[in-house]
Image: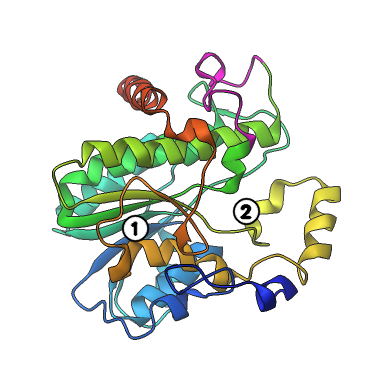
């Protein structure tokens, strides 16, 4: 536990900075619930997989390869179902959707946990900057493909980040989604996390009139392999600060798990959560016009993919 967590308080939910995924689900029975989580093979995704299965849920765990998904699912106690879902490969995402349909699975929650961060140089997939494509477009294909499988009160949880504050002015630079008009690792990462947040907001609006919900969460700053692309200086700083301020993986997984399954979060939608409580996002994250445009542009992108 970090030193900061020892002194951090709790919010209205009864949980806070130092709460763990096990603590926010203590006493809950998730028997009969089925929850999908992307990036189940490491870090926050694996901890969420473990805790949700521990509480009795059937957890659909996806990873970049079926081998990784199977290994992750086999490493925890409980009922799990492994699937391959490489978010940077549209064919893989579509195959995952098709396989879940074929298995006759109904989903009580979808946790979009997987992602990449701060690539040191511009990389692209299908003509788009890779962080935007992986973190947003891949999840856009997955979630929109699975919407018909959501239960009547199903929940969608997007793992955004306080890093959305690093996004360019206006939130999304629609004229530079390829990144070739200027690339900055943290700016492009921030844009992808802003996209996750805007997607949750727009999906929530599209759920209007139903009991389905969509929210975005900031997990906290955690030292996981998500930071493997950081330059050596940043890796040193993160390593040095680990015992002072960084959350543990158990603490980092708490918010996404809380929003996905806790009874107190039922009915909450279109929100941004941090430390298991509603938090304030950057102002332009609430711009409905930008969110609608992102959805429309994303649909256009997906329609052109092989």
The foreground one among 195 and 98 is: 195
C-alpha span from label 1 to label 2: 21 Å
Q: Classify residue 216 as left or right of residue 303.
A: right
Does residue 104 sit above or below 126 in this rendering?
Answer: below
Does residue 91 sit above or below 177 in this rendering?
Answer: below
Does residue 47 sit above or below 215 in this rendering?
Answer: below
SS for tag 1?
strand
Q: Classify residue 27 as left or right of residue 19.
A: left
Of labels 1 and 2, earlier in sequence is: 1
* Magenta-highlighted residues: 166-181
Residue 244 percent across, percent down from the top left? 77, 69
The question of residue 306 being in magenta is answered with: no
- Name the residue at 37% across, 26% down: 298
Question: Mark 1 or 2, which is nearer the eye?
Answer: 2
Residue 145 percent across, percent down from the top left? 24, 41
Does residue 298 sit above or below 24 in this rendering?
Answer: above
> Crowding near pointer 2: few (<14 within 10 Å), some, many (20+)?
some
- Name the residue at 22% across, 36% down: 206
The question of residue 179 being in magenta is answered with: yes
Q: Is residue 60 visible?
A: no
- Which disc, if any, is residue 83? 1
The foreground one among 165 and 226 is: 165
- Name the residue at 67% across, 28% down: 122
Q: Residue 295 falls in which quadrant of the image?
A: top left
**Split into 4 quadrants, where in the image is the N terminus?**
bottom right
Q: Which residue is mark 2?
A: 226
- Name the residue at 68% across, 76% down: 7
């Amino acid at each position: 536990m970090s030193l900061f967590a020892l002194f951090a308080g709790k919010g209205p939910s009864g949980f806070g900075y130092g709460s763990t995924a096990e603590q926010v689900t203590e006493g809950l029975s998730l028997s009969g619930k089925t929850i999908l989580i992307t990036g189940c093979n490491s870090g926050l995704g694996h901890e969420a997989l473990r805790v949700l299965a521990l509480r009795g849920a059937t957890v659909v765990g996806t990873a970049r390869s079926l081998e990784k998904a199977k290994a992750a699912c086999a490493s925890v106690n409980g009922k799990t179902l492994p699937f391959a879902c490489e978010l940077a490969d549209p064919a893989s995402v579509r195959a995952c959707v098709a396989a879940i349909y074929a298995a006759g699975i109904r989903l009580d929650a979808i946790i979009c946990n997987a992602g990449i961060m701060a690539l040191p140089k511009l990389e692209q997939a299908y003509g788009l900057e890779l962080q935007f494509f992986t973190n947003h477009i891949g999840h856009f294909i997955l979630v929109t493909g699975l919407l018909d499988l959501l239960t009547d009160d199903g929940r969608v949880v997007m793992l955004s980040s306080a890093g959305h504050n690093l996004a360019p002015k206006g939130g999304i630079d629609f004229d530079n989604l390829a990144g070739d008009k200027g690339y900055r690792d943290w700016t492009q990462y921030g844009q992808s996390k802003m996209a996750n947040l805007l997607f949750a907001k727009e999906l929530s609006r599209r759920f209007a009139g139903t009991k389905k919900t969509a929210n975005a969460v900031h997990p906290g700053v955690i030292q996981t392999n998500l930071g493997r692309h950081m330059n050596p200086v940043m890796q040193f700083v993160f390593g040095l600060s680990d015992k002072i301020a960084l959350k543990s993986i158990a603490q980092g997984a708490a918010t996404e798990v809380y929003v996905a399954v806790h009874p107190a979060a039922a009915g909450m939608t279109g929100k941004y959560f941090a430390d298991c409580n509603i938090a304030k996002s950057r102002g332009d994250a609430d711009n409905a016009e930008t969110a609608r445009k992102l959805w429309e542009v994303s649909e256009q992108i997906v329609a052109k993919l092989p």
